[in-house]
Amino acid sequence: MNTLNDTPTSERVHIAVFGKRNAGKSSLINAITGQSLSIVSEIAGTTTDPVYKSMELLPMGPVVLIDTPGIDDDGELGSMRIEKTNEVLRKTDIALLVVDAVSGVSYEDENLLKIFKKQDIPFIVILNKCDLLLYQEKIGENSLYVSAEKGINIFELKEKIAHIDIKRADKTPFLEDLVDVNNIVVLVMPQGAAAPKSRLIFPEQQAVRAIIDKDAICVCIKDPWQIPSCLKSLRRQPKLVVTDSQVFKEVAELLPENIKLTSFSILMARYKGVLKYAVDGIKSIENLVEGDSVLISEGCTHHRQCDDIGTVKIPNWLSVYTGKEFNFEFTSGREFPSDLSKYKLIVHCGGCMLNDAEVIYRYLTAARNNVPITNYGTLVAFLHGILDRCLEPLNPPPTEPREYKFNSKKRFISGKWTDI
């Protein structure tokens, strides 16, 4: 049976609650959800780490509420908590700034408002504890008097939040625009040791859903060796084949050139709005020199296997392709360095477990620091000499054709890289 929590966190609107200690952030979270999720105390600094709660907020839909530590926390631990709050800012779709209505807007509150405006984050200023005011001054349209303790204007606040439009005007579908009614799409989904038990990973689920929603025909196979028999059993040629990046080489060798091919990772980069950055990042590979630092960043925290794509396969493929040894560093989950200056290349996963705001933040941070960034699927396709082929099905491609023709100098033939 499906539940609210079946919607992945990455697909939920992230609503983060910010403010000073004892402004009433945790009380507000409890009032919005109708549950005692966050510990409430008169002692300043009760919330020590961000608290996440998934819920349904109509008419917006699935959301995740994030309670953050006070932005005015002090001491060594306080600094660490503030850093956690800053990390939350990276993934925030809507910001709620909770202000003690009696004390008024503080210097710290003003700084947060500047950040919201700079990062183009929609926000609401919530003047909490309004029941303690003798009178209420006139406030702006994106502000609201509230009492979390007395329940005053909580319904109005939820209505105000739910009607904020945060949809990206340029949001690209996952693959719905690449297929038509009754088109056949083949998905190659290896289920190795790293695959989750009894379920498909999110991009695979998303692909299946997109195909059936378009009234197209979805054919799923587990291993590349099944491709010839799969094609033989079909009366019509598939419009598209989508594969896991780890088996790109095997799929490309078995799939006729006239059948379009791409990967879940490339589609995810396109869906998140960062594919052009990923493609541009490929251009830096030929400039890497011995000993350069390369960051490989995962958005999830799955248990690493002996043949893990991020920590084993990609470092090996990149070193063998270039004939050079690099200093590889790895991050996972919510970790992402604020200082990227030492890296000559960043290779990021597809980002399926991160929301759009977090993914875009990471790519823009790399761009602002002039550090090339690409993703797993784009890099693996390039290293196997098939990036042109895997970008061709996209509608439109991430850049003009003359800009993304990557004719790799080498091909992986008979177990080794060969000059061509």
Image (spheres, helix red, strand yellow):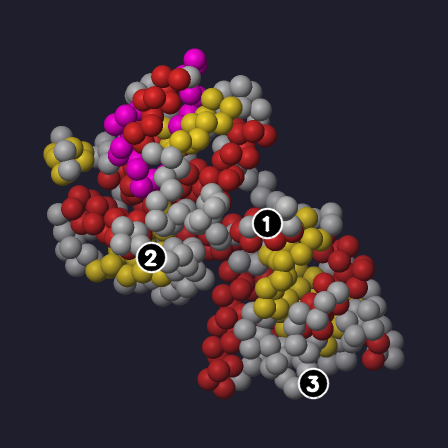
Circles 3, 2 touching at the beta carbon (< 8 Å): no
C-alpha distance separating marks 1 and 3: 35 Å
User: For the point 53% across and 29% down, which residue is it?
Assistant: 211
Q: Amino acid at mark 3?
A: Glu
Mark found first going from the N terminus, 3 or 2: 3
Q: Amino acid at mark 1?
A: Asp
User: For the point 33% across and 18% down, which residue is it?
Assistant: 258
Mark in the foreground, 1 or 3:
1
User: For the point 55% across and 40% down, which residue is it?
Assistant: 171
Above or below for 215 versus 196: above
User: For the point 77% across and 60% down, which residue is it?
Assistant: 157
C-alpha distance separating marks 3 and 2: 43 Å
Mark found first going from the N terminus, 1 or 3: 1
Q: Nearer the viewer, residue 206 or 359?
A: 206
Which quadrant holds residue 189?
A: top left
Residue placed under numbered mark 3 in the picture: 42
Q: Nearer the viewer, residue 97 or 50?
A: 50
Q: Is residue 203 left or right of residue 1?
A: left
Magenta residues?
A: 235-255
Location of residue 7 in the rendering, given as x and y in whole percent from the top left corner: 59, 49
Above or below for 99 versus 7: below
* Mark 1 closeness class: few <14, some 14–19, many ≥20 residues within 10 Å: few
Mark found first going from the N terminus, 2 or 1: 1
Q: How many numbered tags mark residues here?
A: 3
Residue placed under numbered mark 2 in the picture: 304
Disc 3 secondary structure class: loop
Q: Amino acid at mark 2?
A: Arg
- Determine which of the numbered discs, if any, sits on residue 6 in the image: 1
Q: Is residue 243 left or right of residue 181?
A: left
